[in-house]
Image: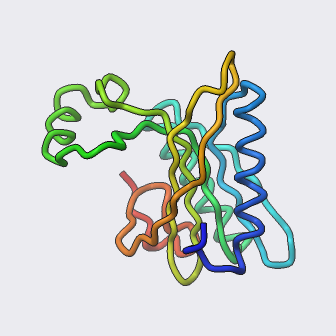
Amino acid sequence: MHNIPEAYRPVVEKIIGTMRKFLAEGEELHTFVFLAKFDGNFFPVPMNTSSNRDKEASAYLVTLMSKEIKPDFMIFVSEAWAVMEETEPQEIEKFLKEYKSLAEHPRRQDIVFLTLETRNGIWMGTSPIKSLGGNQRGFDEMKFTESTDATGRFTHFLSPESNTMH
């Protein structure tokens, strides 16, 4: 977390703490975008990610809200699937062409995913989800990297004209 800008750390830490609480209580982490202002106002927007059509509609809603609210920054949180261990990109690409989803990949891991988007950059953090016993789950410290080439439906909400819809 030390590589995201200091001004955003308290908010990111609070959201990560809430994510930990939900998982420790056995809850599913629902996908949300938080449109935020430095004055402390937050506008949580639940995202429906059950289908491509729902993802597009959710991204469009956030884009419209962002144009209206003009947030200073946004935070996107979700559970996701990833192949965290070293895997050749060609292998994953081949797998996705055949199966269309990482859901069936033999080395797939459930992860927590958080994106911080500011006017000065985008930082992405992930951490594998692990069992804490029973239905409780948790995750270790999230590792954040700055992304200079992030694209996709869930990015660039602060500058919606650069959002690449799929």
**Whole-percent x and y of residue 134?**
69, 15
**Whole-percent x and y of residue 158?**
58, 73
Question: Would residue 57 appear left or right of 70 to someone viewing this image?
Answer: left
Report the number of discs.
0
- Report the quarter where the N terminus lies: bottom right
* Nearer to the camera, 128 or 146: 128
Rendered position, 18 above or below 9? above
Name the residue: 40% across, 58% down. Answer: 152
Q: Quadrant of residue 102?
A: top left
Rendered position, 44 above or below 157? above
* Nearer to the camera, 150 or 133: 133
Q: How is the image coloured?
A: rainbow
Q: Quadrant of residue 48?
A: top right
Name the residue: 36% across, 51% down. Answer: 166
Q: Quadrant of residue 13?
A: bottom right
* Nearer to the camera, 59 or 73: 73
* Nearer to the camera, 109 or 92: 109
Rendered position, 102 above or below 158? above
